[in-house]
Image (cartoon, coloured by chain):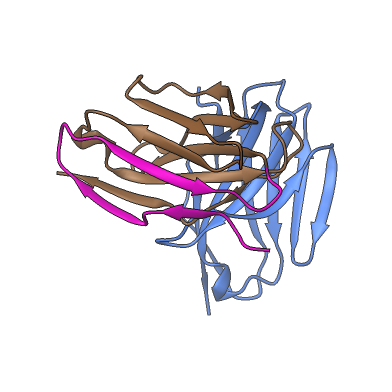
């Protein structure tokens, strides 16, 4: 079974631009969660989508948004990029949204904001 | 107080020894607990999940959970140089959200 895929793997943007990242979950998984990883803050939860609905959201500004499509693929968007948005963005998929479900991570998208 | 705290590292053990990684969490409503391994430049890889008090063994790995003490640990027996990585403790208390510790860097030296 194929794992979680994320595109693109690397991105370089300048301040003020916007970016869209894509995530395809493991086949049959309906929940997708997004995380930001930085050396200073570690891994932080952005949001989770299940059946095209945002079920949970972390403490990030409204510039960070996401959506999920009917095939469970998900995208996240960051508008008006800031230098501090440079990070590894990871998505993780699980079968459902409940507590006892394991999350499996994709390879991540490395975003650099100049 | 951080929501999930891991024992400060880095941790260095000789090949063949037992590596012990510890994690405490603050939310008593937490229901599921996970250990991930992350190699440098790679994404986290799930190695263990545990949901009830006690021990859970999988090969050389044993996870231990004590909800009363809000404590979860990971033991790696017969440590190998290939086990050298950052180990992340993650706790789930609500839908889809994993809260991670800061990670413990483990080095296994030959």
Residue B27, image quadrant? top right
Q: Nearer the viewer, residue B103 or A58?
A: A58
B51 shown above or below B25: below
Q: Nearer the viewer, residue B21 or A20?
A: A20
Q: Give the brown chain's letter.
A: A
Asked whether residue B8 is in view, the answer is: no
The image shows residue B60 at horizontal and vertical percentages of 74, 66
The reply to whether the magenta stretch includes residue A26 is: yes
Q: Which shade of the palette goes to chain B?
A: blue
Residue at the image position 57 percent from the left and 23 percent from the top: A56
Asked whether residue B3 is in view, the answer is: yes
The image shows residue A71 at horizontal and vertical percentages of 61, 42
The reply to whether the magenta stretch includes residue B57 is: no
A47 shown above or below B53: above
The image shows residue B33 at horizontal and vertical percentages of 70, 39
Q: Is residue B65 left or right of residue B101?
A: right
User: Hey, which residue is sitting farthest bottom in the picture?
Assistant: B110
Q: Is residue A50 left or right of residue A36?
A: right
Residue at the image position 55 percent from the left and 26 percent from the top: B3
Q: Nearer the viewer, residue B4 or B78?
A: B4
B8 shown above or below B92: below
Residue at the image position 22 percent from the left and 33 percent from the top: A81
The number of callouts visible is 0
Q: Which residues are magenta?
A: A1-29
């Amino acid at each position: 079974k194929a794992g979680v895929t994320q595109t693109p793997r690397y991105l370089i943007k300048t301040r003020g631009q916007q970016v869209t990242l894509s995530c395809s979950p493991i086949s049959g998984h309906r929940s997708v969660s997004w995380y930001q990883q930085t050396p200073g803050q570690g891994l932080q939860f952005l949001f989770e989508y299940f059946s095209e609905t945002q079920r949970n959201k972390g403490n990030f500004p409204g510039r960070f948004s996401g959506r999920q499509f009917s095939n469970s693929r998900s995208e996240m968007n960051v508008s008006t990029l800031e230098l501090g948005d440079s990070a590894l963005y990871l998505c993780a998929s699980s079968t459902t949204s409940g507590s006892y479900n394991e999350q499996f991570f994709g390879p991540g998208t490395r975003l650099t904001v100049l | 107080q951080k929501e999930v705290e891991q024992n400060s590292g880095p941790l260095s053990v000789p090949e063949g020894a037992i590596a012990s990684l510890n994690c405490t969490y603050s939310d008593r409503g937490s229901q599921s607990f996970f250990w991930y391994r992350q190699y440098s430049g790679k994404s986290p890889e799930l190695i263990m999940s545990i949901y009830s008090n006690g021990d859970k063994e999988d090969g050389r790995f044993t996870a231990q959970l004590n909800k009363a003490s809000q404590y979860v640990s990971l033991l790696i027996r017969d440590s190998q140089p290939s086990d050298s990585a950052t180990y992340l403790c993650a706790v789930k208390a609500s839908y889809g959200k994993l809260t991670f510790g800061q990670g413990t860097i483990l080095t296994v030296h030959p």
